[in-house]
Amino acid sequence: MATRVYVPRETAAVSVGADDVAIAIARCAKENGESIELVRNGSWGATWLEPLVEVLVDDKRIAYGNVAAGDVPALFDAGFLRGREHKSRLGAINEIPYLINQDRWTFWRCGLVEPLNMDDFRVHQGFKAFEKAVGMGADKVIEAVKTSGLRGRGGAGFPAGIKWQTVADAEGEQKYIACNADEGDSGTFSDRILMEGDPLGLIEGMMIAGFAVGATRGYIYLRSEYPLTHSILSRAIDTARDAGWLGQNIQDSGFDFDVELHLGAGSYVCGEETAMLESLEGKQGIVRYKPPLPAHEGLFGAPTVVNNVVTLASVANIMNLGGEKYASFGVDRSKGTLAFQLAGNIKRGGLVEKGFGITLRELIEDWGGGTASGRPVKAVQVGGPLGAYIPVEQLDTPLDYEAFIGIGAMVGHGGIVVFDDTANMAQQARFAMEFCAIESCGKCTPCRIGSTRGVEVIDRMIKGTERETNYDLLVELCDTMEDASLCAMGGMTPFPVRSVLKYFAEDFASAVGADQ
């Protein structure tokens, strides 16, 4: 019998040599007369251990971490196919603390299954939730999502059940599900890990949403910088369609639903829902005035649910396990789990799915192992390039939407970027304004012009030119951008700038000449 060996086909793993490792394992197996079945799975999210190779021995998957292609001959000599000792051996995958101490609700299949294998997906509850949803009826599906307290995981945090109800109640012969997979925030990769590791799970979530609101078509708007994701998702959609899980009268349910994959052109602002809809319609990705909201007039003027990848992928287990079970995770109004993504100057970078209420300190120290440099943490940016820089004294703030709003920050998409004490935060404030100037769609003056002026003002402060006068000017500029910008691009750029002015003002003096 062939020994099953798992090597991830996931962007981070591939970037550090997973494809070469897979080739080396196949070659060594042939040379040693060993019969193997090579499975290309997704990532478990322990990015710091990639390439993470597993071998199935007596119904246990034994993991070996940070395997390089050059290590493979020695692994075979050590008895790798029988799970024997080697310096890279980590033990059984279901005994690794980093993984088993998580609350893996949405990402439970990532790493476990072969992403494009329909039989494997079905064995692991694939489409069970859709079948249950059809049996419950649309109204009860929406009620279950409301009960769960699920909020949009793309950053806005709007209750998903209310959005679905609005679209369900809206008049319209045609309705749409638009999945926002334009994951452009710095330090974020949860959407990508899910789409590469459990693409059929995302499709099932979109099907359930479509059934609930009466939509027959879904679109996935994918960022162009994810070529491997694009390949995997394209094949997953074809696989689902060929197996009768997409198209007309799905599995004799009387429900029609199909999915189309759309590749973006690299615009950050297309992560904003209305700019994304413009791009889907073949127009330039520029934000729309609101109202009307997309739930009333969205894609092609029809009622549209716009949800993030993780939001939609969380729905299947809400159907399977119940809205009350999901709501038992988290705190206050922040129910359920979020995939926190550890990046930047961090020893153990990767994805950690936990219930809301965990603190930044716990994530950074207990899960991330502290900084990669070994130096003290100075600041942590949460929520992407528009998120505030959080000082050390606020690391014990519980991660939930309202608690972070209370300190002038945001949870956003759950990206966490760590900086040690060598970072100059004045330069980071400059980066925020410069990023906005580059990525602005240009529709509104506060964002388009304000960000450009912001860079100039910060440059004067860094050089020591009338620092107090320019400080007042920068605060006034932030007020204007926050109050008058058309969307969050300009409206939230002041968040990181204000946090630097409040907690790291001394860095403006130490930044003199840093950019020269």
Image (cartoon, helix red, strand yellow):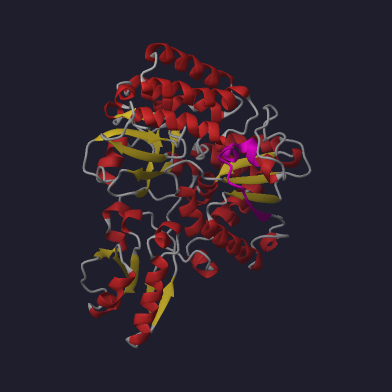
**Is residue 368 rendered to the left or right of residue 260?**
left
* Magenta span contains residue 66: no
Query: In this rendering, is residue 275 above or below 477?
Result: below
Res 462 → quadrant: top left
Residue 510 location in percent, x, y?
29, 25
Residue 246 location in percent, x, y?
66, 60
Res 327 → quadrant: top left
**Is residue 376 rendered to the left or right of residue 21?**
left
Tally of marks? 0
- Looking at this view, name the residue that lies furthest to the bottom: 33
- Chain part drawn in magenta: 258-276
Q: For the C terminus, which image quadrant? A: top left
Identity of the residue drawn at 55% across and 59% down: 200
**Is residue 219 rendered to the left or right of residue 350?**
right
Name the one closer to the observer, 299 or 434.
434
**Is any atom of residue 319 visible in this view?**
yes
Res 52 → quadrant: bottom left
Q: For the N terminus, which image quadrant? A: bottom left
Identity of the residue drawn at 70% across and 51% down: 217
Name the one closer to the observer, 426 or 133.
426
Residue 101 location in percent, x, y?
30, 50
Name the one closer to the observer, 501 or 430.
430
**Is any atom of residue 157 visible in this view?**
no
**Is residue 337 rendered to the left or right of residue 170?**
left
* Magenta span contains residue 266: yes
